Amino acid sequence: MILCCGEALIDMIPTPTTSGPDGFVPHPGGAVFNTAVALGRLGVEAGLLTGLSTDMFGAQLTRALADSHVDATHVIRSDRPTTLAFVQLTNGQARYAFFDENSAGRMLTPADLPALPDSISALYFGGISLACEPGADAYAALLACEGDTRAVMIDPNIRPGFIQDEPTYRARLKAMIAASDIVKLSDEDLDWLIPGPEPVMQKAAGLSGQGASLVIVTRGSAGATGLLADGTQVTVPAQKAQVVDTVGAGDTFNAGVLAKLSELGRLSKEALRDLTSDEVEAALSHGAKVAAITVSRAGANPPWAHELAEG
């Protein structure tokens, strides 16, 4: 099982009303939640470890996990509120206003975390859950405790406006990246993480030197590049799509990559160290295909496996 560890929240998506201004409709979301749901829909055995509320939005998120065949055994429930993310769309690009204080997800502590069974073979971390304490410290502790024998992927999905203590965040993220086998960042993430005029792939090589078997850099419509530890680069184009919005695009790309690596039998620490360029190309292309379907419809609505086959 791939266990996705991080936030689940409600995206409040602007939607036309019959009269007056747009309203906001609640959609299940959150970067890590989206990746878990996308994996489940692609037929991969996946679970979610997060803090979920017992409120009405928490119930909506729970139903969405079940509907997409995502295991919720490791969900930690409380009566704290659900995180809400109000979305503003401009030419299909999403901006967010988060309401996260004292939320069920944010207030996780290391003491809340369960021991993980051997059936969990891979861990996925990312999103705003890595920026906000105390939950961020809980996920860092989980990786430190449980990541030595499992394949680990991280996508920090950096949101500078969410970071209250930049030195602490940078130190935490550096340690988590060093413990990860797959590191995925957008070009904007990489420029924030490693400031300076150096080319993007030169910066990516610096991360590769910290121990990752595969560093993936995404460039939106310009596609994605995978960098292997030996310096080999593999680039795939973005797939053409009629973009409705970009909510969840990167999250479902990650699910596509993980799903293909799992299908190829390469989702272990040992196997990832021996990845070939053809396998990287297959994984990135699959991620691009999954993401293209997601951006073609409103909200984070990842495709099912049969939709890929039909395409």
Image (cartoon, rainbow, N blue to C red):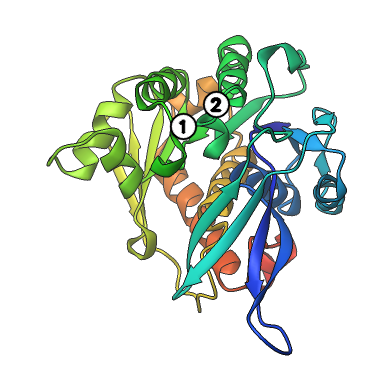
Query: Is 245 or 289 nearer to us in this picture?
Result: 245
Tell me the residue that label 2 is attached to: 152
Residue 103 appears in the picture as rendered: yes
Q: Residue at x 42, y 43 (%)?
A: 161
Q: Is residue 212 left or right of residue 292?
A: left
Residue ID at (54%, 46%): 254
For image coordinates 81% across by 50% down, the residue present is: 57
**Taking 235 as reference, is 170 above or below it?**
above
Question: Residue 73 vs residue 276: left or right?
Answer: right
Decide which of tag 2 and tag 1 comes sooner along the chain.
2
Judge the density around disc 1: few (<14), some (14-19), many (≥20) Cα neighbours within 10 Å: many
Find residue 111 and report its image quarter: top right
Q: Quadrant of the N terminus?
A: top right
Which residue is label 1 attached to? 182
Q: Nearer the viewer, residue 33 or 131?
A: 131
Residue 66, above or below 152:
below
Q: Secondary structure at mark 1?
A: strand
In the depicted structure, whether residue 164 falls above or below residue 233: above
288 lies left or right of 209 = right
x and y percentages locating residue 221 in the rendered image: 37, 65
Residue that lies at the very extreme toward the bottom in this rendered image: 19
View extreme (front): residue: 20
Q: CA distance from mark 2 to mark 1?
A: 6 Å
Quadrant into which the C terminus falls = bottom right
* Residue 123, horizontal then vertical, whole percent: 62, 28
Q: Position of residue 4 (x, y in %)?
A: 66, 34
Q: Do tag 2 and tag 1 residues touch (Cβ < 8 Å)?
A: yes
Dot 2, how many residues are within 10 Å of its Cα: few (below 14), some (14-19), or many (20+)? many
Residue 272: image location, x then y, percent? 48, 28
Residue type at mark 2: give it. Answer: Val
Q: What amino acid is labelled 1 in the image?
A: Ile
- Residue 292's tag is none
